[in-house]
Image (tube, rainbow, N blue to C red):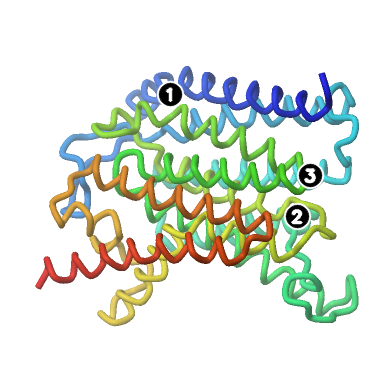
Amino acid sequence: MTPDHLLRFAAVGFICISFVISVGMTPLSILIAKKTGVMDVPQDARRMHKRPIPRLGGLAIFISFLICVLVYRGLVLSGFVWAHEPLETIPKLTAVIAGGIIIFVLGVVDDTLNLPAKVKFIGQIGCAAVVFFMGLRIPSITAFGWHFAEDSVGDLIFSFILTVFWIVLITNMINLIDGLDGLAAGVSGIAALAISYASYIHGQYTAAFVMIILAGAALGFLPFNFYPAKAFMGDSGAMFLGFTLAAVSIIGPAKSSTLIATVAPVLVLGVPLFDVGFAVIRRKLRGQPIFKADRGHLHHQLTSMGMGQRRSVLMLYGISGIMGIAAIVFSRYLYLEAIGLFSIAVVFILIFIWGWNKHES
């Protein structure tokens, strides 16, 4: 068996194991949520469900991911399978694991105590700062071609701002789209698969394997979360998925193509990015606080047009899939083709927004 075949075989094995662990852990997370009272009770019109739902499903995703990533890390360090894998990525992987634990704990506390939005935001910044000082960062020199002296004060400050902004942004994006049954888990799974393949193309095997593991964990939770949901992932799951997507997308070596490393994840996460952008604009125009929840998100708009939860989620899966393919095409330096695919997805989003505005009027 060639090394390339071995890598592919291992990737299939990891996604299957991650999927199975997540499937097996979800009933346990439901039981724990019921015993501890961590339930999502519909108390306002923004909620789409009508009965209390356990919201500790993030535990299944987190445990599945953590087990598989620790196994992968051990195999790399032992040289048992990936002897050619660059060991300089291991400290970055350790940062991802540490940051994931912190953000998950923050999410569990929020699911239990309903923390104020500002407290969560500060906690997310703190988590991003931790992984930055552990060595996981977006290099400011290569990010936009600016010529800071390496490891100078300006370099570190700008790199810190970029890294924290990116991680906090993506963490909140996944959290904000977690409004329909199966939406956040499915979109995260699609994004993770696309980033995994794009990373594999460029020889960034650690990022590829961590993303394939995350995809398995998210998709393993999906059977319990798809409409009608038996469990919600809660903020513990949504923030963990968002953080991991953001952190792993910058885990590649600093000398890799920065254009690919920074633009491809943006393409993959186009749906939540547009959703967040429209939410900020919408709330500013209405004079509302940016963090105030409302029913103006894309998924709410689709259901308001009469599409129903299942069709709305499947439609957003399709758009996310198009954007994921656009990211993969972009990673192969086919820029015009990637722009074409991305434009098609954007047109669909704009059609939905226009249709919803007509419906509301």
In the rendered image, residue 3, in percent from the top left (x then y), is placed at 83, 27
Closer to the chain start, of discs 3 and 1, is 1
Secondary structure beneath label 1: helix
Q: Residue at x 71, y 42 (%)?
A: 200
Q: Are marks 3 and 2 in contact (CB under 8 Å)?
A: no
> What amino acid is at disc 3?
Gly
- Up the image or down, 326 lies above or below 226; here it is below
> What amino acid is at disc 1?
Thr
Secondary structure beneath label 3: loop
> What amino acid is at disc 2?
Leu
Q: Is residue 106 visible?
A: no
Q: Residues within 10 Å of mark 1 (few under 14, many from 20)?
A: many
Q: Residue at x 28, y 32 (%)?
A: 229
In the rendered image, residue 156, in percent from the top left (x then y), is placed at 80, 71
Residue at the disc numbered 2: 136
Closer to the chain start, of discs 3 and 2, is 2
Residue at the disc numbered 1: 26
In-front residue for pair 35/330: 330
